[in-house]
């Protein structure tokens, strides 16, 4: 059974623009999927529909065997604990420490009162420390997040998603604000999370070469429609051109960079 299934998803904002147009696909446990496409093609809307920050206009989304549109607020909150989210601008509480931000990932499991008073069990704290160590942040645990580099902040974002014990992690342009070294560290961690922990990872990316290097599968969107869905080896220069409506020379450059990264 697929971990995630989208059936005929359409999203219209303000009854005008069709941000997603009849999108259907399914994703298996542990798959690493990159979503690529030009600015405004619907990549963010797609991720936001999956955890229902944005309500699809029509269609059905099934996560881990549960149809999300059928759920009341309480059950939707429970389903969301299975879905971690990582953002381009990290979405951390900057004045709080690394460990406090990471433990926020447990809030979905708590009553409002326990959350307000920051009541976390020893087991929750032990797990948070263990994840921070895995991500190379054990020296930063008590630092305020406003004192961290962008790459470190993004690793805190990953740790916060992981303490949820998610089955699926959605990443909305996780490396768009990072330099190449920090980007590589983040992508390596995301790839390991999928391969070693069996967690499904879906990443929106602007960098085709990064998608080619890291993904099991690439989904190309243009104007709200899926125009490519397959492994990196099947993504031809022609298809990249179609996804981006771009000039062939710029596509050759993207692929060349991908080959250099892969090599
Ligand atoms: N809240 C909103 N209200 C109205 N229109 C929106 C809203 N969010 C997105 N859109 C529109 O939906 C379309 C898809 O936007 P979306 O942000 O999903 O694309 P994207 O591929 O993620 O773009 P980018 O790569 O620039 O982040 C665009 O035309 C955008 O203007």
Image (cartoon, grey):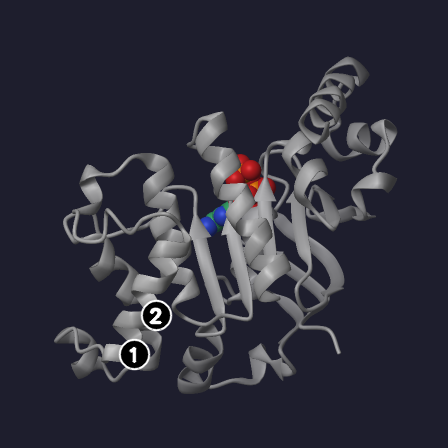
Task: Tell me the tag on residue 236.
Answer: none
The residue closer to the viewer here, 138 or 103, is 138
Could you tell whether 50 is left or right of 75 in the image?
right
The residue closer to the viewer here, 25 or 19, is 25
| Residue 202 visible at all | yes
The residue closer to the viewer here, 130 or 115, is 130
The residue closer to the viewer here, 32 or 52, is 32
Could you tell whether 8 is left or right of 99 in the image?
right
Q: Which image quarter holds the N terminus?
A: bottom right
Could you tell me which residue is drawn at 57 percent across and 78 percent down?
69
Badge 1: residue crowd in 10 Å (few <14, some 14–19, many ≥20): few
Query: Between marks 1 and 2, how big is the CA–CA gap?
Result: 6 Å
Callout 1: CB less than 8 Å from ligand 1: no
Helix, strand or loop for disc 1: helix
Give yes or no for contact between labels 1 and 2 (Cβ–Cβ under 8 Å): yes
Could you tell me which residue is drawn at 43 percent across and 42 percent down?
88
Helix, strand or loop for disc 2: helix
Task: Tell me the tag on residue 123.
Answer: 1
User: Would you place residue 121 above or below residue 238 in this image?
Assistant: below
Across and down, in percent, residue 125 comes to 26, 71
Q: Which image quarter holds the C terminus?
A: top right
| Residue 173 visible at all | no
Task: Tell me the tag on residue 127.
Answer: 2
How many numbered marks appear?
Answer: 2
Across and down, in percent, residue 100 comes to 21, 61
Could you tell whether 77 is left or right of 192 in the image?
left
């Amino acid at each position: 059974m697929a971990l995630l299934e989208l059936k005929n998803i359409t999203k219209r904002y303000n009854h005008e623009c069709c941000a997603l147009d009849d999108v259907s696909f399914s994703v298996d446990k542990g798959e690493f999927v990159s979503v690529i496409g030009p600015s405004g093609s619907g990549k963010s809307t797609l991720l936001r529909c999956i955890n229902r920050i944005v309500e699809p206009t029509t269609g059905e989304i099934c996560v881990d065997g549960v149809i999300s549109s059928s759920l009341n607020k309480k059950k939707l909150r429970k389903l969301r604990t299975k879905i971690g989210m990582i953002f381009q601008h990290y979405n951390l509480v900057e004045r709080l420490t690394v460990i406090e931000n990471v433990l926020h990932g447990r809030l979905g499991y708590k009553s409002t009162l326990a959350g307000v008073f920051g009541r976390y069990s020893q087991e929750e704290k032990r797990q948070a420390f263990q994840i921070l160590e895995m991500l190379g942040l054990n020296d930063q645990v008590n630092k305020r997040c406003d004192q961290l580099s962008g790459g470190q902040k993004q690793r805190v974002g990953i740790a916060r998603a992981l303490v949820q014990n998610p089955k699926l992690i959605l990443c909305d342009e996780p490396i768009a604000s990072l330099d190449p070294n920090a980007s590589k560290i983040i992508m390596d961690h995301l790839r390991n999370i999928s391969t070693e922990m069996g967690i499904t990872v879906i990443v929106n990316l602007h960098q085709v070469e990064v998608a080619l290097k890291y993904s099991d599968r690439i989904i190309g969107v243009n104007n709200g429609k899926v125009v490519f869905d397959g492994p990196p080896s099947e993504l031809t220069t022609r298809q990249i051109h179609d996804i981006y409506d771009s000039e062939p020379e710029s596509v050759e450059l993207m692929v060349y960079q991908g080959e250099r990264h892969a090599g």
